[in-house]
Image (spheres, grey):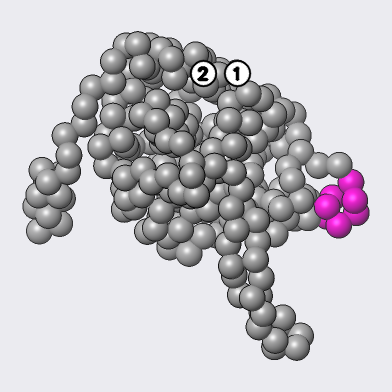
Amino acid sequence: MFSLLRRLGDALRPRPEPISDERWQAVVTACALLQPLDAPQSQRLREFCARFLADKQFVALAGAELSAQRCLLIAAQACLPVLELDYDYLRGWYQVLVYPDEFHMRNEHHDEETGVVTDVEDSRIGEAWDYGPLVLSWADIEHDLADPHSGYNVIIHEIAHKLDMRCGAANGIPPLPPGLPRSEWKRTFQQAYEAHQAAVDAGEEALLDADAAESPDEFFAHAAEAWFSNPALVAAAMPAVAELLRRLFRPGRDPASA
């Protein structure tokens, strides 16, 4: 029954439109993270992007400008983490919301000591909701494109959260491929997370932002964006974490070429 429903769903989805050579080359030129891909990888990513553009509704908010080429740039970076996994990892949600710059989210803050609940307005550059939209700041996407090896990439960060949520509540453990034991992942990431927390508490310089010390899922998302942006930097600072990320995102490939 599930396979029948899935086939019916696939039949109802808009048919992906091929991406022209000119448009694809412009995206590869603009996004340095795509340039190391070999020809088969680039073609596979191109096909994933066509499916992403057909599957997702892009919505410009608060006066954001959203051209077809900007949508393709977002799609390419969103699909990059699942390039050697499967496109279906990006199923289950349908919108990409784009603001021109950072945006504000209203959240409830619960003080565990007093029990008082207050409304807090936070500034965000990205947000990923379980079964909901991917929310992005275009200004920060442009910043990542201009400085691609800085360790930051807001799109990949939020896609990492999306992957994490596929296993239920976000906990820093995304769906893992065969040969990558959950126990090994959990142990390695927990040790690295606790070491990062200790460094932040001590005021020491760390590879990842202080925000990565908030929770295991934030640590995973920060580590993933850093690894895609600058894998050598992550390998030098957190070799065990870098190796697990390679086994997740680039299984079967030489670590030196990750």
- Residue lying at 42% horizontally and 44% vertically, measured from the top left: 60
Amino acid identity at mark 1: Ala
Q: Position of residue 247 (x, y in %)?
A: 51, 34
Q: Quadrant of the C terminus?
A: top right
User: Label 2: which residue?
Assistant: 30
Residue 251 is left or right of residue 188, and the answer is left
Residue 56 vertical position relative to residue 49 in the rendered view, above or below = below
- Residue lying at 70% horizontally and 59% vertically, measured from the top left: 214
- Residue lying at 36% horizontally and 43% vertically, measured from the top left: 58
Residue 35 vertical position relative to residue 169 in the rendered view, above or below = above
Q: Position of residue 173 (x, y in %)?
A: 52, 53
Residue 245 is left or right of residue 123, and the answer is left
Q: Residue 227 appears in which quarter of the rendering?
A: top right
Residue 26 is left or right of residue 154, and the answer is left
Q: Position of residue 40 (x, y in %)?
A: 35, 15
User: Label 1: which residue?
Assistant: 256
Residue bounds of the magenta highlight? 198-204
Q: Residue 139 appears in which quarter of the rendering?
A: top right
Amino acid identity at mark 2: Ala
Q: Which is more N-terminal, label 1 or label 2?
A: 2
Tag 1: Cα neighbours inside 10 Å, few (<14), some, or many (≥20)? few
Q: Secondary structure at mark 1?
A: helix
- Residue lying at 61% horizontally and 37% vertically, measured from the top left: 140
The answer, for residue 134, to whether it is visible in the render is yes
The answer, for residue 161, to whether it is visible in the render is no
Residue situated in front as seen by the camera: 18 or 82: 18
Q: Secondary structure at mark 2?
A: helix
Q: Which mark is residue 11?
A: none
Q: Nearer the viewer, mark 2 or mark 1?
A: 2
